[in-house]
Amino acid sequence: MHNQTEAYYLERIIQGDKESFTPIVEKYKDMVYTLCIRMLRSEEDAREAAQDVFMKAYRSVESFRGKSKFSTWIYRITYNHCISMLRKQVKMIDLVDELPEFRIDEETMDAMQEIRDGERKRYLQKAMETLPETDSLVVTLFYYEELSLEEIEEITGLSGSNIRVKLHRARQKLYIELSKLLKTEIQSIL
């Protein structure tokens, strides 16, 4: 962040220095956009939402008290804004899904290990797109952003046990979806 701390820039913003918000945006733009795309599943909506999030953060930066990390605070703004957008679109977020038990197909997992990294990311992205918005968000926050369960609780308002259940079920869904994608790919090659 241009050789200064985040706290320095936040204080400068509060004092009226609009230019000091640029390093904050630079630091968090990818994270905010990733959360928006995971929840909204539309690049256009995600770009619009990310801009709105930064406008909200800028206008309310004085309300940031430092009780949590700034990243948690901006995650919370992003989450709430995306939820509002989803409600406006009259979408229902699937909070709890019952999945049948499944067994692990070792052949599919071995095939996954042999796919190049780029293709692995492509398959994982396709599988992530099948998850409900809330599950996708929780997976992104936990695995990609490496946030703790407590930080995810603060951002989403979900309980720790609910987050653990969502992570478990999301992993199951991802495995099932990846298995389907890989079997289709293997069959097309053969």
Image: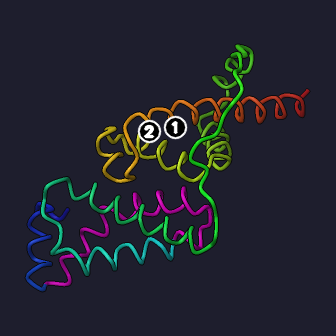
Specify start and end residues of the magenta stretch as a single range.
17-46
Figure quadrant of residue 67: bottom left
- Residue 88, given in percent of the width and then of the height, sits at 57, 75
Tell me whether circle 2 and circle 1 mark residues in contact (CB < 8 Å).
Answer: yes
Quadrant in which the C terminus appears: top right
* Other-residue count near label 1 (Cα within 10 Å), few / some / many at <14 / 14–19 / ≥20: many
- Residue 177, given in percent of the width and then of the height, sits at 71, 36
Q: Residue at x 49, y 62 (%)?
A: 36
Compared with residue 41, is residue 172 higher up or lower down, i.e. above or below?
above
- Residue 141, given in percent of the width and then of the height, sits at 41, 46
* Magenta run includes residue 18: yes
Figure quadrant of residue 143: top left
Compared with residue 108, is residue 139 higher up or lower down, i.e. above or below?
below
Where disc 1 sits, the SS reads helix
Give the amino acid type for the residue marked by disc 2 in the picture.
Ile
Figure quadrant of residue 180: top right
Quadrant in which the N terminus appears: bottom left
Q: In the rendered image, which residue does mark 1 sit on?
A: 166
Where disc 2 sits, the SS reads helix
Q: Residue at x 49, y 42 (%)?
A: 139
Q: Residue at x 20, y 53 (%)?
A: 69
- Residue 149, given in percent of the width and then of the height, sits at 34, 38
* Magenta run includes residue 118: no
* Other-residue count near label 2 (Cα within 10 Å), few / some / many at <14 / 14–19 / ≥20: many
Q: In the rendered image, which residue does mark 2 sit on?
A: 163
Give the amino acid type for the residue marked by disc 1 in the picture.
Lys
For marks 2 and 1, give the CA distance: 5 Å
Front in this rendered view, residue 184 or 83: 83
Q: Is residue 72 left or right of residue 42?
A: left
Compared with residue 87, is residue 185 higher up or lower down, i.e. above or below?
above
Dominant secondary structure, magenta: helix
Compared with residue 119, is residue 87 higher up or lower down, i.e. above or below?
below
